[in-house]
Amino acid sequence: MLPDLLIEIGTEDLPARYVVPLADALAQGIAGGLERRGVVAGAAQVFATPRRIAVRLAAVSPQQPDQLVARTGPALAAAYKDGKPTPAALGFARSCGVEIEAIGEKDGKLHYAKSVAGQPTTELLAAIFEETLAKMDELVPKRMRWGAGTETFVRPVQWLLCLLGSDVVPLSRFGLESGRISYGHRFHAPDAIALTDPADYGQALRKAHVWADFGTRRDEIERQIKAKAAQLGGHARITPDLLDEVTALVEWPVVIAGDMEERFMRLPPEVIVSTVETNQRYFTLFADDANTQLLPFFITIANIESTDVGQVIAGNERVVRPRLSDALFFWEQDLKQGLASYGEKLASVTFQKDLGSLADKAGRIRDIAAQIATALGIDGADAVRAATLAKNDLVTKMVFEFPELQGLMGGYYATKSSESEAVASAIREHYLPTQQGTPIPSTREGQIVSLADKLDTLAGIFAIGQKPTASKDPFALRRAALGVLRILVEGELELDLRSLLDAALKAQPAGKRDAATLDELYAFCAERLRSYCESRGASVEAFEAVRAAGVSQPLDFERRLQALLRFLPTTEAASLAAADKRARNILRQAGETQATIKPERFEVPAEHALLDTLQRVEAALAPLRAERDYGAMLSQLATLKPPVDAFFDGVMVMAEDAQVRANRLGLLARLDALCREVADLSLLPG
C-alpha cells in the first residue's frame, strides 16, 4: 500500500480572508509539483483553520519513475561544416556530458536523450515546497518578517510538519526544521501532538479540540446556528460570505447567543444587521422568512468552551452595545431635519473634479430621469422627485458611518419626511442592481432613477477620457453598463440605448461629447450586452446574427434573440442559413441587382413558386413586425425552405441571358432581405 503524504504549516492566527486561499494553494502546489515530476498521488484533502494550513495526499508513490531527459541543440546547418562538427556542436555535446558521436538529430537539429533514474519522493519535496511557497506569496500582497530571520509569510510560522507514511520528510524553512509534531487548540489542548501516520491527522486534532477540515467545520457551525435560532423562536440570517469568514476565525466552534436592548429595535433592521454582521461578525435573527421582523438577539461562534458562558455572553453584548448606541444616535440626529434639506450639503462634496459636485450630479440625474419618463410616456413626477433626493442621504451621519447603507437610508428618511411610497422606494432601490444576480429596482420610478444615475456616470467618465482599462475600472463602469442593460431588458422598457447615452452625454459639463465618444460608449455597452446574453446561454452566432440587424433597443434585441434561440434547433433554421449564405455569395459576386422582378421572364416553375412564397411571406410579416412577434415571423420564414431548396436545385442563377439572370438575382435579393428581418440568418450555422 502506498503511503499518504501530509504537510502542515502552523502559524499565528491568519487573517480570515487568506485561510482557504492559502490552504488551496498549498494543496495545488504540492499536488502539481508531484505530477510535473511524474510522481503518482491520489486525492488531496485540504485542512484550514486560523492556526494551520495543511494538505494530505493519499497513496503517494515513494519513488519518481525513471525520467527521459531530452535536449535539443543547434540546427544541423550550424552544427557541421564540411562534414566536421563546429564549435557549437562540440559545445552542445560537452553540455550533455557525452562525446559528439553520441549526439543524434531530430527535426533538423542536434538532439540528445538519455534515461535518468528517478529520485525518491522525499528528495523531491524540498524543491516542490519552495515552488509552492513562492506561489502562496503571490496571494498575499503584504507579508510579515519576525524574529531575526529574513523570510516572510502572512503571519509568523510556528511549526512545520511533513510526513510520508511514518517517515519525516526533511524540510527547512522559516528557521524551522520539519518534524512529526503538530499542536491542538491553543487553550483546550496546547501540548504537542506526535503523529505517526498522516491518516491519523484529522482524528488526532479533533481529540485536541481542533476541527481541521474547513468544509465540515462550516457545516457544523451552520447546524449550531440554526439550532440555536430555533431555540430562540426565529431563524438566523446566514450569508455565505459571513459563514465562510466565521469558519475561518475558529478552530473549535461553540455557538453563543446574546441579547440586544429593546431601544435598539427602533432602528431600521438593515442598520442593526450591518452593525452586527459587518463589524462584529455576528448573526442576526428574524421572526419571519422575509427578514423584516428583527428579533432582539444575536448569535456568535466562540472558539472555546468556556466554563463561565455568562461572562462570554456579557462580553459580546458589551461589544455590540456601543456600536448600536452610535447607530441610534446617528438615526435620531438625521431625523431632526427632512431629507430634502440635506441637498444643500451636496454642493460641498465632489463627485469628480471635472464633473462637479454631488449636487451637480443630482441635477443631471433629475434631468435625465425626466427625459426617460417622457420617452416612456408616463407621468414622471415621482421619478423626478426621487432623482432629486436620491443622493441626499450621502451627507447624513448614518451613511457617513455606514456607507453600505446608501440609498437604503435615503428610503427610510424619505418615508419619515412624508414623501410618497413611490419616491421612497425609488430612492431605496436606485443603486440596484449592485452586481450580477441581484434584482433590478422593483418599481418603474426606481428603474428610471437607477437608469439615470448609471447613464450619467457612464457618459461623464467616458466624456473626460477615463474609460476602463483591461485591469482597472475605478468607477465600476462595466457594472453600471450591465445594470442599464438589465433594467432595460428585465424591466421591459422599450427605450433606445443609443438615444439614452446621447442624452446623458449631452448633459455632461465637460469633456468630449461628440459622435466619436457616443460611438465608443455605445460599443462599450454593446460588449456588456454580449456578456449578458452569453451568460444566459446565447451562442456567439445567435448574438452576432441579431447584432447585425442593427437593433439599438436592448429589449427588442432580447426578444429577437430569444425567438432566434427557439428557432435554431429546427431543420428550417440550418437550411435557411445555408440558403442565405449561398444567396449572399452570389449577390456579392454579381454586384448591383435590379429591384423589379418580371414574372414573364421566368423559365421554370421553381421561379414562380419562389416568388409566390416570397410575396406571401412579405405580406404575412407586415402585421407581425408591427407587433414584434419575432417567433411568428421566423415561423413564416421557415415556410421558405421548400421553394428555396427547389429553386437552388432546379435553377441556374447566373444564366447567360442577362435579363433572366437579373430576374433571378432579384429573387435572391428579396430572399436575402427577408432573411435579415429578425436577424442576419446568414451568420447562423448551416
Image (tube, grey):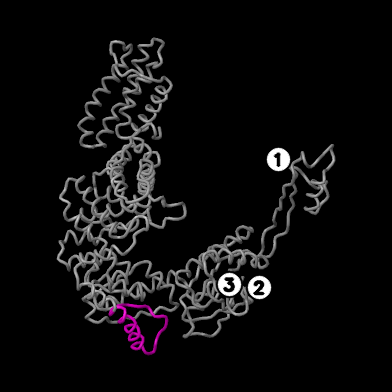
Q: Nearer the viewer, residue 209 or 660?
A: 660
How far, Cα to Cα, is label 3 from label 1?
A: 46 Å
Read off the residue under disc 3. Answer: 152
Magenta stretch, residue numbers:
298-325
For label 2, the crowd category at 10 Å Cα-Cα, with few meaning under 14, some 14 to 19 and many 20 or more, is some
Number of disc labels: 3
Q: Are marks 2 and 3 in contact (CB under 8 Å)?
A: no
Q: Which mark is residue 107?
A: 1
Of tags 2 and 3, the one toward the viewer is: 3
| Secondary structure type for disc 1 | loop
From the image, which quarter does the C terminus lie in?
A: top left
Q: Quadrant of residue 57?
A: bottom right
**Residue marked by disc 2:** 170
The answer to whether residue 112 is above or below residue 551 is below
Residue 620 rendering spot, x and y as whole percentages: 22, 28
Give the main secondary structure of the magenta stretch: helix
Q: Is residue 307 magenta?
A: yes
Q: Secondary structure at mark 2?
A: loop
From the viewer's side, name the closer residue of 199 and 513: 513
- Amino acid tagged 3: Thr
- Is 425 above or below relative to 15? above
Question: Closer to the observer: label 3 or label 1?
Answer: 3
Q: Where does the N terminus fall, quadrant-wise?
A: bottom right
**Would you place residue 42 above or below residue 106 in this image?**
below
- Please provide percent x and percent y for residue 211: 46, 76
Q: Is residue 655 magenta?
A: no
Kind of residue indicated by mark 1: Asp
